Amino acid sequence: MINLSLKTARNLQLAAQGLLHPADEAATPERLLAAIRKMSLLQIDTIHVVARSPWLVLFSRIGSFPLSWLEQALRDGALFEYWAHEACFIPIEDYPLLRHRMLSPASLGWKFSADWMQTHQTEIADLLAHIEQAGPVRAADFAAPSQQKAGWWAWKPHKRHLENLFTAGELMISERRNFQRVYDLRQRVLPGWHDDRMLSETEAVEQMLRNSANSLGIFRPEWLADYYRLKKVAVREVIARWLEQGFIVACNIETLGTLYLHHVLLPLLEQQLEATHSTVLSPFDPLVWHRKRALELFDFDYRLECYTPEAKRRYGYFVLPILLRGELKARMDAKMIRKSGVLQIKNLWLEPGVPATAALCADLKGAIDHCARWQGADSVQCDNLPVALTPRWQPVWSLTA
């Protein structure tokens, strides 16, 4: 049993996630792919009040980069989309890992409807024939019925067909146009694939757990299973076997008790681990997507409130966590106003007990400025600042000076 401080445990997870230190070189397409492989999964969300989540997750790790690089990686076949933690971009080499889910789509709950597929057999067969003959399609290529009701989940029939076929692995996402999915036949996207290359469910679950252990670095058993949304997995039996194999080691963390450390991080314990990176995070960043983990490990009580009625929100619509040298010390409700080139911070909060020192203010402002410049902002406007920050900050400042 290795005894570690809470600070060291945090820094080990940050190291595993690529968030311990800022990028030491300019971003490249290769570094973008390396960052995704390090995380194993890049969750997709379409909200773009500041920047779309997958772009923001990558920015936090590799710095400023052209947004087109992610879609180009998908188009080039270096990534594929499927259900993992949720909808995710996944390195193409992990396709054999998730193929078994496609062959048993009913196990994915609401993401697949056998009744819908049965009821609409003819229309779905016609749609597949159309794609085979005419090429890839978007849901936007098909009109909604005249009686279609509006609403977030009020999908038109063709959208339901496409999504069910995607979940069943018959269609894949060949590219995105303006971030809209483009669906094509699996045989065209992966022409050389044969199902004899897929992993069995048992093999796949083992590898998903290994990927999760590598991407988390240090973890509780329940944190491990959540990474790929694994259900009814005997994680403790796996951990016992891994301990015998030396794949992981047990650690006693102050205030947290027993956690498990991936063996590749053991050399870091011989170094003085210091977190030097400060950055804005996405609400769907792997560091915070497991809300209980963020609370236990980083003492950061967080939930995304964009789906919460406005009257019940504690903070705001799209609140971004802010990592400051190894700790989640602040959060902001922000919006990028592109027409005027302004990053508008509707509210900014320091976490309880965080002092507004000169060093913290410099790190916080630097993280915000870096994100704002990446998004093309010319200035930052703060509508509501913590009282402790008002002597040090102006409500508006230019980024072009």
Image: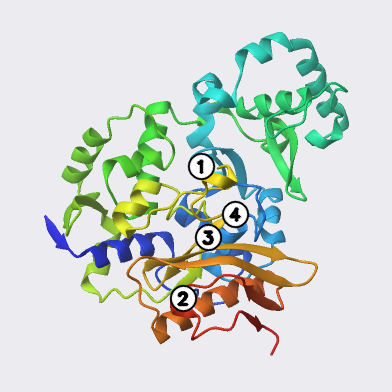
Q: Which kind of residue does numbered mark 1 sit on?
A: Asp
Picture quarter with the N terminus: bottom left
Q: Are marks 3 and 1 in contact (CB under 8 Å)?
A: no
CA gap, disc 3 to disc 1? 29 Å
Label 2 CA crowd tier, 10 Å (few <14, some 14–19, many 20+): few
Q: Mark 4 touching mark 3, by CB under 8 A? A: no
Query: How many angstroms separate mark 4 from mark 1 (CA)?
Result: 21 Å
User: Mark 1 near mark 2, Cβ–Cβ under 8 Å?
Assistant: no
Q: Earlier in the sequence, mark 4 or mark 2?
A: 4
Is 263 rendered above or below residue 105? Answer: below
Mark number for residue 94?
A: 1
Determine which residue is flagged by label 2: 387
Of callouts 4 and 3, which one flags the residue occurring earlier in the amino acid sequence? 4
Cα–Cα gap, marks 1 and 2: 48 Å
Please name which of the two marks, 4 or 1, marks the residue nearer to the observer. 4
Q: Are marks 4 and 1 in contact (CB under 8 Å)?
A: no
Q: Amino acid at mark 3?
A: Leu
